[in-house]
Amino acid sequence: MKTGEPLQSLHSGIRRLVALAYSELDHRARETIACNYFVDALAEPDFAMKVRERSPANLDSALRIALQLVVWTIDVDRVRNEQPKHFAR
């Protein structure tokens, strides 16, 4: 994954490439392969591990998990930046 590449672009690119490369496999097998490729392609290993820990069942659920983790990370960073300095540890 390129830095700054939207997760949705990675998702659609992997979906397209897996459909082309593994057209002979059934849908379930392609989804498993696509999900693994998606997680492996995430730029940050710690982020990828967090997605993998949630055991996504398919490519769409891997995307949903990744997007939710991004939202939570942004929210945590926002809260940290809003805390008064004298309460920071």
Image (tube, rainbow, N blue to C red):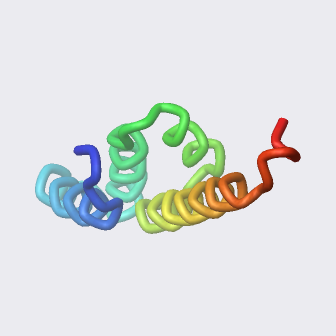
Residue 8: where, in percent of width, then height? 32, 66
Residue 16: where, in percent of width, then height? 17, 63
53 in relation to 61, above or below: above
Residue drawn at (27%, 45%) of the image: 3
Looking at this view, name the residue that lies furthest to the front.
Answer: 86
Residue drawn at (53%, 58%) of the image: 70
Residue drawn at (38%, 58%) of the image: 31
Q: Nearer the viewer, residue 81 or 5?
A: 81
Q: Nearer the viewer, residue 27 or 54?
A: 54
Q: Quadrant of the C terminus?
A: top right
Q: Nearer the viewer, residue 86 or 4?
A: 86
Residue drawn at (12%, 57%) of the image: 20
Q: Is residue 17 left or right of residue 29?
A: left
Residue 16 seen from this side: yes
Residue 80: where, in percent of width, then height? 71, 52
Corner quadrant of residue 36: top left
Q: Is residue 32 left or right of residue 34?
A: right
Q: Nearer the viewer, residue 43 or 23?
A: 43
Looking at this view, name the residue that lies furthest to the left.
Answer: 20
Residue 57 seen from this side: no
Residue 77: where, in percent of width, then height? 62, 54
Q: Is residue 26 left or right of residue 61?
A: left
49 in relation to 35, above or below: above
